[in-house]
Every structure is written in C-alpha cells, then in structure tokens.
Image (tube, helix red, strand yellow):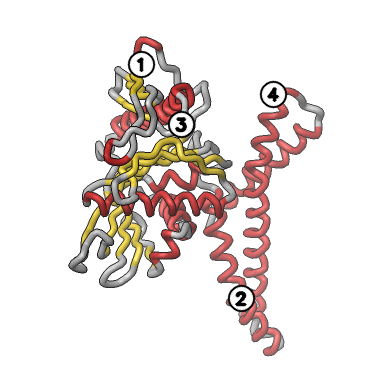
C-alpha cells in the first residue's frame, strides 16, 4: 500500500497550486506554477482513482464477510471483490510509476547513439535494426526523429548512427535503453547457416538547454575535412565534414551528413553538449556514491538485453527479467513492456 500521508501531501499541494493560479499570479511565477500544476494533474487524477477503488474494495470485503447479509448479495460482493482487487493492483502499479523521483532531464528531448560492436558486418546490420526500432517507437509515441550523423557499412548496416528524438518526456522513457544489446541469429552474411552472436551499443543522452553546458573556446578544437561514404568513396568535394574535440575530456564528435560545413558544425555542437552533460551527471552520481560508501561500476555499457532469433525466439531484459517471445514485434517498436518493467523495477528500489 502507498502511504496515505504521501497521497495527502500531493493532493494538498495540487489544491494550493490551483489557489495560487486563481489568485492572479503572472509572469515567470505563473509559468513555473503552471508547469508544476500540469505535472501534478495526472498524478492527482491517479490518486483519486486509487483511493476510490480502495474504498470500493473495502466495502465489498465488508459485505462479502458479513454473515448477516443476504447470501445472494454476499455472492455478488465476492464477485465484485475479485474484479476490484485486479483493478486496484493495476492502479497501484500505475501510481507507483507516477510517484517515482523525476530526473532533472526527464522532460528533455533525447539524442540516441547506436554503434556496431563485436560481430563485424552482422553487428552493423543489427545496429541498423536497433535504429529502426527506436525510430518506430518514437513514431508510436508521437515524437519527431532526425538523423544527425550516419556512418554506413558496406552491406547496408550502420557502424555508427546518431539520432535526435524530439518530444516531451523522450529522455525519460529512452534513457533505460543505454547499454549493450546482443543478438543471436543466423545472419544474412552467413552462407552456411551457422548461428552468430553480435552486439551493438546504445547510448541515450538528454539534449540540454544552452544554460546546462558552457564550453570555453580554448577547450575546443575544430577540424574540417571532406565527407566520405561507405568504403571511403567521396560524397562531396568540399571540406564540409566537421570534427569537434573537447580537449579537457577528450570527447570527439564528427558530423558529415549535412550539405554545408555550418550545418554539420551545428549538429556536432548539439551532440557534444549532450555528451558533456552526460559526463557531468555520471561524475555527480559517482561522487554521491562515494559519499554514501557505494561501489558503482566505471562503465555504463554492461549487457542489458538479448535478442534471440535462432534456434528459438525471445527478447529478454537482463536487468528486470522481463521477456517476450515475439522478436519481430519488439524490433518493430513495441518497447512499452520493457520501459514499464524497468520503471517498476526502479519503483521497488532495485538498482
């Protein structure tokens, strides 16, 4: 059960916000209050449904257990109690998700980076499958996607792809995808029908506002060069590709997809800022862990999910244990089950 004191505090805060908004507040204060009001509204609605179902369940329990009641009424109450228990469990899970602490960047758009790992051409083909999966998931969520950078392999896969996913809460849902994704299947590159295992790495970064990251000119090296395609074939004859190097951290971002040098510079700049913000967040988390005496792994790229297409079909998340048998459906963008499982995993306090 969720503590009633927690629910009462949320409802009281929502009422206070409505009173302040109705009092004629304007300017930046009004904007701030409106944003908090909009964030709390669905939570308070969930609280009302949760409380109402809890009360109905208590009433059904009392009637079903009342020996003085009419037997037919007790039977109806028993039937209703079973339905209410199921509804209450669903409402409780949904409310737990809504009560999870919010990351400061949760409302941000996201930058998704997919890189081929071990497995050669097959890994590049799997990276392309993952990129398509995230594009379709974003479409289902009503988000907009834009490819920022793409390095193709000879067989039509991607050695590296960087994509922006623009939409409210994109980072909040996609951030759990960061890590190593492994696939087991008979690849199109295998003539003998042997099963191969390959991997791709996914990194999901929040797209920061200008105020989040400040980069000194002296800390940045900018190189320009000719863009090239798969196999080294030149795709233009001008130095339009841009490489940004952040000297203090060694972070390097290259972009060559756009037609002009300025466009590539703008895209590379956005990706660089996102990577630096992520480094700052990781350093902060590590510092907090040290203060608490916790031990955190130095790397973020541990294997998080397996996609098995042969000899059987299954997609399994190794952090939560959630799995489904329809691999095609998952690769077609059906990720809600995995996102929900990880949110519930976090709600139970698991690491």
Secondary structure under badge 3? loop
Q: Is residue 155 left or right of residue 100?
A: left
Left or right: 79 with respect to 161? Answer: right
The quarter of the displayed image where residue 91 is located:
bottom right
Q: Nearer the viewer, mark 4 or mark 2?
A: 4
Task: Compute the Cα span from label 4 to label 2.
Answer: 48 Å
Q: For residue 258, which numbered disc appears in the image?
A: 3
N-term-proximal mark, 3 vs 2: 2
| Nearer to us in this view, 197 or 238 | 238
Q: Badges 4 and 1: C-beta atoms under 8 Å apart?
A: no
Q: Is the C-beta separation of discs 1 and 2 under 8 Å?
A: no
Whole-number angstrom distance, CA of label 4 to CA of label 1: 35 Å
Residue lying at 41% horizontally and 65% vertically, measured from the top left: 328
**Neighbours of disc 4 within 10 Å: few (<14), some (14-19), many (20+):** few
| Residue 336, above or below 163 | below
Q: Mark 4 or mark 2, which has the lower sequence index?
A: 4
Q: Nearer the viewer, mark 4 or mark 1?
A: 1
Label 3, label 4: how many angstroms apart (C-alpha)? 37 Å
Q: Which mark is residue 81?
A: 2
Real-space CA distance between mark 1 and mark 2, rounded to the nearest whole angstrom: 65 Å
- Closest to the camera, between mark 1 and mark 2, is 1
Residue of label 1 = 220
**Disc 3 from disc 1: Cα separation:** 21 Å
User: Which sits earlier in the primary sequence, circle 3 or circle 1?
Assistant: 1
On screen, 192 above or below 250? Answer: below
* Res. 77 in view: yes
- Tag on residue 28? 4
Residue density around tag 1, few if under 14, some if 14–19, many if 20 or more, within 10 Å: some
Residue 350 point in image, percent of width and height? 37, 51
| CA–CA distance in space, label 3 to label 2 | 61 Å
């Amino acid at each position: 059960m969720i503590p009633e004191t927690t629910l009462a505090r949320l409802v009281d805060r929502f009422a206070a916000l409505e009173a302040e908004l109705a009092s004629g507040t304007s300017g930046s204060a009004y904007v701030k209050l409106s944003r908090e009001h909009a964030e709390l509204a669905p939570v308070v609605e969930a609280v009302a449904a949760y409380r109402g179902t809890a009360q109905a369940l208590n009433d059904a329990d009392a009637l079903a257990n009342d020996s003085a009641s009419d037997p037919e009424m007790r039977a109806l109450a028993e039937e209703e109690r079973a339905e209410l228990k199921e509804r209450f469990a669903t409402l409780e899970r949904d409310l737990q998700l809504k009560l999870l602490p919010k990351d400061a960047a949760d409302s941000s758009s996201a930058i998704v980076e997919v890189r081929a790992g071990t497995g050669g051409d097959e890994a590049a083909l799997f990276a392309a499958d993952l990129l398509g999966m995230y594009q379709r998931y974003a479409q289902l969520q009503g988000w907009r996607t834009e490819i920022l950078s793409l390095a193709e392999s000879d067989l039509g896969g991607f050695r590296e792809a960087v994509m922006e996913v623009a939409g409210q809460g994109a980072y909040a849902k996609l951030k759990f995808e960061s890590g190593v994704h492994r696939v087991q299947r008979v690849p199109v590159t295998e003539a003998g029908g042997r099963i191969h295992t390959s991997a791709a790495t996914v990194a999901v970064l929040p797209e920061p506002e200008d105020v989040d990251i400040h980069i000194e000119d002296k800390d940045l090296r900018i190189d320009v060069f000719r863009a090239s395609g798969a196999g080294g074939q030149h795709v233009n004859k001008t130095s339009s590709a841009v490489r940004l190097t952040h000297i203090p951290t060694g972070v390097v971002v290259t972009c060559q997809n756009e037609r002009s040098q300025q466009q590539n510079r703008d895209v590379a700049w956005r990706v660089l800022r996102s990577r630096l913000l992520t480094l700052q967040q990781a350093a902060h988390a590590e510092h907090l862990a040290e203060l608490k005496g916790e031990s955190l792994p130095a790397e973020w790229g541990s294997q998080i999910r397996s996609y098995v297409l042969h000899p059987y079909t299954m997609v399994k998340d190794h952090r939560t244990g959630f799995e489904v048998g329809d691999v095609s459906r998952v690769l077609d963008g059906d990720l809600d089950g995995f996102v929900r499982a990880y949110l519930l995993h976090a709600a139970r306090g698991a690491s």
